[in-house]
Amino acid sequence: MAENCNHDCASCGQSCSERKEPESMLVDANALSNVKKVIAVVSGKGGVGKSLVTSLLAVLMQRRGKKAAILDADVTGPSIPKMFAKSERATANDMGIFPVESSTGIKLMSVNFLLESETTPVLWRGPIISGVVTQFWQDVVWGDIDYMFVDMPPGTGDVPLTVFQSLPVDGIIVVTSPQELVGMIVEKAVNMADMMNIPVLGIVENMSYFECPDCGKQHKIFGESNLDSIAKAHNIENIAKLPIRHDIALNADKGLIELTNVDELDALADMLENE
């Protein structure tokens, strides 16, 4: 034992007979679940299109012949059911809870599938919300899944910490918008991932530009982006810049996200397949 030992092995680099490695906080998935990859989709603030990107990536991987799923961890502001036009209640038996399936077979679990009405507010404190997210991993019968995308609430609070510690997250994708203020918030999310030793697989800048349908010129509605400098500073190679498109917003609102094509995400999907 070191002479000045404070018995906090997590903050000590010494190797001694008394050293204890920190215990894993990972929780077991349902016995009937076999999830190969878990990708958390995060954002530093709300309103940047995190749920949209989550849905588009799941749709894209499903089109490529993979089995995709979405765990909606944004318990107080669930958007996933609306994206896929799903409002039925999830069913359950003694094996667990069964996810709702989209029209193309993407498996979905959201708190809205457990509430009496999709407009019922969730008035729960942080520990209860975190417990619900853990239950979505433990109690839901996901079956065989190649890629599970976890739609996270914005920020770096209780739920992101619970997901990073309790689920076997293979990497995160950060969603942002071009504003300068958001750039600072993005760095907070990236730094949190670094602190949790989870790799940042890519950054998606939503609402990056608007392309004029008449002349083809790109207009930076929200100003010039600093995404490239942020990615370079953190050695993040995979970035995608999504345009402002009326059809994307319309399909999301009408629950037709599975009919949407966004070519700008292809390179990110390629990277996920090759991981």
Image (cartoon, rainbow, N blue to C red):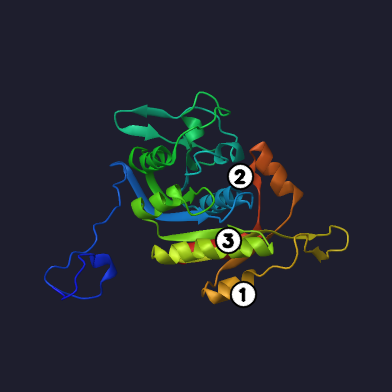
Please tell me in which quadrant of the rendered image residue 179 appears: bottom right
> On the image, numbered disc 2 is attached to which residue?
258
Residue that appears at 26% across and 56% down: 24
> On the image, numbered disc 3 is attached to which residue?
185
Residue 236 in the image, given as x and y percentages of width and height: 53, 71
Q: CA distance from mark 2 to mark 3?
A: 30 Å
> On the image, numbered disc 1 is attached to which residue?
229
Left or right: residue 55 versus residue 24 is right
Give the residue type that dot 2 points to: Glu
Residue that appears at 21% across and 67% down: 6
Disc 1 secondary structure class:
helix
Q: CA distance from mark 3 to mark 1?
A: 14 Å
Left or right: residue 66 versus residue 48 is left
First along the sequence among labels 2 and 1: 1
Residue that appears at 54% across and 60% down: 174
Q: Quadrant of the C terminus?
A: bottom left
Give the residue type that dot 3 points to: Ile
Residue 74 in the image, given as x and y percentages of width and height: 51, 43
Q: Which mark is residue 67?
A: none
Q: Which of label 2 and label 1 is nearer to you?
A: 1
The answer to whether 104 is drawn above or below residue 189 in the figure is above
The answer to whether 145 is drawn above or below residue 230 in the figure is above
Residue 86 in the image, given as x and y percentages of width and height: 56, 33
* Residue ranking furthest to the right: 214
Q: Which of label 2 and label 3 is nearer to you?
A: 3
